[in-house]
Amino acid sequence: MSRGMKVKVLLILAAALALLMVNAAVFAYYPVTVTVTGVQPVILELGANAGKDDLGADNRIVVTLGPKKASASITLHPTYQTTYYKNVTVIKNLDSRAYYVAIRVNDFADPSVFTEASLIICASSGATIATIDLTATGTSGWFGPLSAGDNFSLDFRFNIDEGVDLPSAETIGFQVIYSPQNVEAAP
Amino acid sequence: MRDKPIGNKVVFFSLTLLITLSIIVPIYGSVYAYMSLTVFLNPISPPVWFVDPRENQVTVTLGPNRTSALVSIKTLISDVELTYNSNFYLGPDGWYFIPGAYLTNAYWLPSYQGALGVIEIYGTIPGHDGDVAALLQNITIPSTSLSSLTEEIVYYYPSRPLSVCYVLGGLYDWETGIMVFSDGARCVENSWSEAIFKIDPSVVEPGKTYGLVAGILIYNLFLPQTYYVYYDRIELVAKTENPVYGGNWLLSSSDSGNYRGKLVVTESTFSGEVNATIRLASVEGHTSTPIVIRESTVVAGETSEIPFSEPPSGYNSLYFKVDASLEPGSSCTLGLKFVFRTEGAIAEYPITLSIHDPELHDEYSLSLKYNEMIPVYKLKSISLNLGEVVFED
């Protein structure tokens, strides 16, 4: 490297250091306030058959809503062959805008016992909007929209073949996801 | 070197798309709310289950948990027995007791005087007084012309001094409230005896349900005495011109829940000409509207819904009844589902029912009736005015 070149390199390095020092020493502050306001545009409600007689003497269809109606636990008593539960829980839109809905199954029913375990989502007209397989994990596509003030009801259908040993208990966990858009999948 | 014009367009549209997405996506794409639901399933043993009626003309194969059934009915031309559980081998199922003023007790007993499975009627009749009591079963007359109709009653009457006893046969029309047939025969004392009543087939309507009555009339000319009468068999036998079957083809029992049930045809195949009505009847006396098959066409594809619950001991909750008439050599296979529900749950059990003229099929092995040492059952009573007792010297 020639002497002239070395000088140029040193000058560039000095300029770069000077620039870094300048940038490091200057801080600008713009005030941004993030206001978190709790809103609950969509809630869960008891379905028409919550609390009604289930199969088996003294059994009831038990639906317990969380304190803010953002969660629910449901207890059902299916038997062999096909058992259908209509309108157990309702998804209600309290907002003035529409939302899309998706279902994510996290804990699924044992397919070696349940040849079918389905969540059936119905519009307020009674028409079936989506049928979700509850014997496998996964996230459905968006369905709806759930219009302002409208609701979807949740039905369940189970099938247990004869000859299978009945488990004493089985737990299914899933999430109702809602969003104002239906372009991106829910994270 | 000159830039190609197409390159500028790509850059322009790419920038436009990026700007658009950067506006839209941040507004709608990043908001998701999650609500958790947990479903606890507590599967239960079947609260309602099928039972084989053990009828001679019916072969029943139940699933391992008695929630499915494969049923084959063999139609016959001659001597068709229209009564269910006519010999009381397993209990009083299907039979009702019509008490009198004094003859107010009726029980099923495992045996009496060498006969297995009998029904006992007893009560104390004051001196110079009489009484009448009866057993009743609802039967359906086949929907085809009959050449004869015969009621047969096998009974045992232990004698009492200065008493008169008559065995009564009859057919009660529920619609009109009158006996379309009634007759009596003097009791034979202290031995198993048979009373046979020939009924004119013209007094009954094909396809209609009647109450078959097997009664006892006693008059006491002495001091108060306790009377006993035992029944070993009560039959109504019809002879028809076409192969027929009328009676139960399946039963169901249940726990103490309150249910409503119906039958629905899901599929059907026919060969030849088949006429049939299929209905449900409950032990409490409810009867559904029928599934109707006319000339091998399903005219009404489901029954109405009827309520049912836990039956009394020795009885079943529901009786699946059929009245079928076939042209010789005909047959049909029906896919059915038995749908029952509570207030909030609906369950479905599958059934396959085939009805055929055995002339074109292999012989079927008959389901054997057997006796079980089961407890004494009190008969279920119903009200039916049999009229005043009129004693003639």
Image (cartoon, helix red, strand yellow):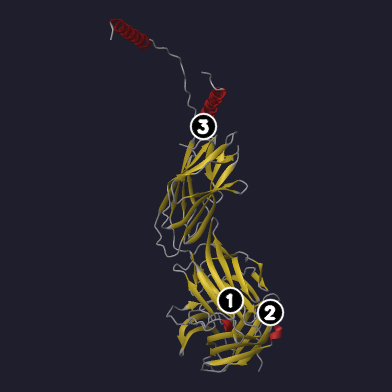
| Residue visible at 52% across and 39% down in the picture | A43
Q: Quadrant of the C terminus of chain B?
A: bottom right
Say which residue label 2 marks. Answer: B206
Say which residue label 1 marks. Answer: B355
Q: Position of residue B39 (x, y in %)?
A: 45, 49
Question: Badge 2, how many Cα within 10 Å: few under 14, some, many 20+?
Answer: some
> How far apart, in angstroms, are the residues tagged by discs 1 and 2?
19 Å
| Residue visible at 48% across and 77% down in the picture | B377
Quadrant assignment, res B43: bottom left
Question: What chain does badge 3 belong to?
Answer: B
> Of B330 and B336, which appears nearest the observer?
B330
> How far apart, in angstroms, are the residues tagged by discs 2 and 3?
72 Å
> How far apart, in angstroms, are the residues tagged by discs 3 and 1?
62 Å
Three-letter code for the amino acid on which mark 3 is drawn: Gly
Residue A64, above or below B199: above
Specify whether disc 2 shares its chain with disc 3: yes
Three-letter code for the amino acid on which mark 1 is drawn: Ile
Three-letter code for the amino acid on which mark 2 is drawn: Pro
Question: What chain does badge 2 belong to?
Answer: B
Say which residue label 3 marks. Answer: B29
Specify whether disc 1 shares its chain with disc 2: yes
Question: Badge 1, how many Cα within 10 Å: few under 14, some, many 20+?
Answer: many
> Of B22 and B202, which appears nearest the observer?
B22
Say which label, 3 or 1, has the lower sequence index: 3
